[in-house]
């Protein structure tokens, strides 16, 4: 009983699912195939996507320095390989090294180190590493930390970071598969054959699987500031990357992203994750994301559920989907707050990372 | 088959129990819900913010705000200036729409954005060209101001390929590049890690959003 699937998946012929038609095994087999495909591949596109201009994200320390943090969604317990690609360079034969650490909800950590082999900007290749999760963990997100060090007397420059979960291959594992607290039951293809009855089990499990897959997160925005940049070059040309959201960011600091009708009715929620820094005891600040006022009162990552209270973007017509502004709002509270020059990160609490995960 | 974009209500679980007559409508709803997931919700997308130096003669290096004073600094080095955006495609990445945020300075020279799709064999930036791509030029497709301030700070603008299905002029031709349209990915490369190479002239790139194009109707 193979839990196999095809890629590209084959859809069901809708003309075979109307009144007066018998239910053929062909349609049932395709339904089983399609849900297995979605479980294996859904959400395995980019979860981290960030680009840096030359000499911005730079490091001359010979020991690891914490520089970026992102929040990434966990797809299921079967998706246990996070592939990370780094574009960067170091003008020497001795490689610079980036270290990535994934911290799970229970504080278990997994690490990979990536050597950066290019010697100048986009000279030849990007470099790849994989974080492999070996244990079983709860939670639907994990924190991804990036550290960087350079060889002695040299400086390492990062140009881009991209990460995605490795899609599963066919067939899926046997037994019930877990996605945080939800379950997915793979559909065996031989059970759907012409000599088998169409069981109640198939219908009930398919409906449960649809609900599990609808709840799977997808990244709408994932941004990290850069901490601890350091260079021997003058500050006018190097080592001044943004480490906080601030002046000039509000007009376009968002992703036009689809949010599907029925999200609220299905009890699904969008979430924002905010990494705040430099808050003193008793300090707090507010800012507005997708029409929601978020109150930040502690350093580190905080999670917020977002109500959908925005108007659609005009881009919806072009995409054929309901597109929304997933990011910061251009409102007075933000203009006069986190994006105001009067609140520099050197003296006040600031937003060092923002992630929005939709469904 | 029509691909719904909404989370429609699924059929009742009780309707699938033993002793119930399963109607075609129940299976049709399941098929529709699964098609929404595979061909709409889980289409690929990537949202790149491009971080620039925050140094300002006004307030030094406070390191806040990627774009100063509501605008993006167009540096003198942004001439034939290349970026490589890595994109993990899906099996359904037939066409890729690009939506970009930029600031452009006409006085710095001819303003343009070129975009092409490449494979990433051996992690190379110079992998096989999959689509030689497109070019946005000013003033037809880009808004560029003439601000003779040296390294100018124009306000952010948007450039978009659109999502429409446009016949490709010649995906294996370098001259002339097509006018803006979604990039086309050959079927053999869908599901692979792709390199969206973007080259800018007299223009500062602030964000690049990459989308698999949603298709309302797919033939089973």
Image: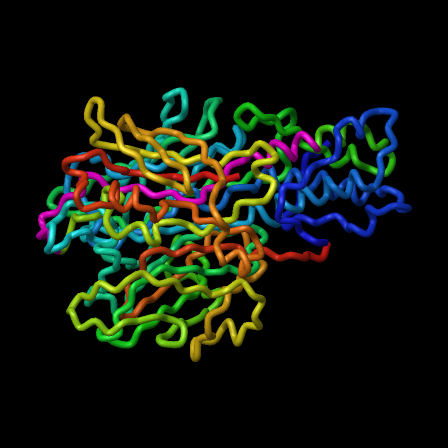
Going by the picture, which residue comes out furthest to the bottom? B176
Residue A5 percent location from the top left of the image = 67, 42
Dividing the picture into quadrants, the one containing residue B219 is: bottom right
Q: Residue at x 70, y 53 (%)?
A: B2
Task: State which region is magenta.
Answer: A207-236
Whether residue B184 is in magenta: the answer is no
**A177 or A355: nearer the eye?**
A355
Q: Residue at x 62, y 43 (%)?
A: B37
Residue A282 sits above or below residue B122 on the image: above
Residue A315 percent location from the top left of the image = 49, 58
Q: Residue at x 58, y 67 (%)?
A: B165
Describe residue B47's horizontal placement relative to residue A123 as left or right. Answer: right
Describe residue B95's horizontal placement relative to residue A26 as left or right. Answer: left
Quarter of the image where the N terminus of chain B is located = bottom right
For the image, the number of numbered tags is 0
- Can residue A156 be seen by looking at this rendering? no
Residue B104 sits above or below residue A35 on the image: below
Quarter of the image where the C terminus of chain B is located = bottom right
Q: Residue at x 45, y 38 (%)?
A: A357
């Amino acid at each position: 009983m193979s839990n196999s699937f095809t890629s590209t998946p084959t859809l069901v012929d809708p003309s075979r699912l109307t009144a007066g038609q018998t239910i053929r095994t062909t349609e049932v087999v395709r339904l089983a195939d399609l849900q297995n495909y979605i479980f294996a591949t859904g959400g395995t596109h980019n979860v981290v996507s960030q680009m840096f201009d030359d000499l911005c994200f730079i490091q001359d320390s010979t020991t690891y320095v914490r520089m970026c943090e992102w929040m990434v969604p966990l797809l299921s317990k079967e998706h246990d390989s996070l592939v990370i690609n780094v574009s960067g360079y170091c003008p020497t034969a001795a490689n610079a090294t980036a270290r990535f650490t994934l911290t799970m909800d229970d504080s278990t950590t997994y690490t990979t180190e990536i050597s950066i082999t290019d010697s100048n900007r986009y000279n030849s290749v990007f470099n790849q590493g994989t974080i492999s999760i070996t244990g079983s963990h709860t939670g639907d997100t994990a924190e991804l930390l990036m550290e960087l060090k350079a060889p002695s007397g040299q400086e390492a420059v990062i140009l881009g970071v991209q990460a995605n979960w490795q899609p599963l291959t066919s067939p899926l594992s046997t037994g019930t598969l877990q996605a945080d607290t939800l379950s997915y039951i793979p559909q065996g293809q031989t059970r759907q054959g012409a000599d088998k009855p169409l069981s109640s089990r198939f219908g009930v499990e398919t409906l449960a699987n649809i609900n599990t897959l609808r709840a799977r997160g997808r990244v709408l925005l994932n941004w990290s500031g850069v901490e601890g940049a350091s260079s021997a070059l003058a500050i006018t040309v190097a080592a001044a990357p943004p480490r906080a959201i601030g002046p000039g960011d509000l007009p376009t600091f968002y992703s036009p992203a689809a949010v599907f009708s029925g999200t609220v009715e299905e009890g699904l929620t969008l979430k924002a994750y905010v990494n705040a820094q430099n808050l003193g005891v008793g300090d707090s600040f507010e800012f507005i994301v997708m029409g929601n006022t978020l109150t930040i009162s502690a350093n580190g990552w905080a999670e917020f559920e977002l109500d959908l209270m925005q108007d659609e973007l005009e881009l919806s017509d072009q995409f054929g989907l309901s597109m929304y502004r997933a990011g910061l709002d251009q409102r007075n509270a933000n203009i006069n707050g986190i994006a105001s020059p009067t609140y520099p990160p050197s003296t006040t609490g600031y937003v060092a990372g923002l992630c929005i995960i939709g469904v | 088959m029509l691909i719904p974009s909404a989370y429609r209500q699924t059929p009742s679980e009780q309707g699938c129990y033993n002793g119930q007559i399963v109607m075609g409508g129940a299976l049709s709803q399941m098929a529709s819900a699964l098609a929404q997931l595979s061909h709409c919700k889980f289409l690929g997308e990537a949202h790149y913010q491009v971080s620039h130096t925050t140094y300002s003669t006004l307030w030094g290096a406070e390191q806040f705000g990627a774009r100063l004073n509501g605008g993006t600094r167009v540096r003198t080095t942004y001439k034939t200036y290349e970026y490589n955006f890595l994109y993990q495609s899906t099996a359904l990445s037939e066409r890729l729409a690009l939506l970009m945020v930029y600031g452009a300075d006409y006085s710095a020279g001819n303003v343009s954005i070129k975009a092409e799709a490449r494979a990433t064999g051996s992690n190379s930036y110079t992998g096989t060209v999959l689509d030689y791509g497109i070019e946005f030029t000013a003033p037809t497709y880009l808004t560029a101001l003439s601000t003779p301030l040296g390294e100018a700070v124009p306000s952010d603008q948007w450039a978009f390929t659109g999502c429409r299905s446009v016949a490709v002029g010649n995906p294996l031709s370098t001259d002339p590049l097509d006018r803006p349209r979604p990039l086309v990915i050959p079927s053999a490369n869908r599901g692979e890690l792709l390199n969206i190479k973007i080259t800018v002239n007299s223009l500062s790139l602030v964000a690049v959003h990459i989308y698999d194009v949603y298709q309302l109707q797919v033939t089973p």
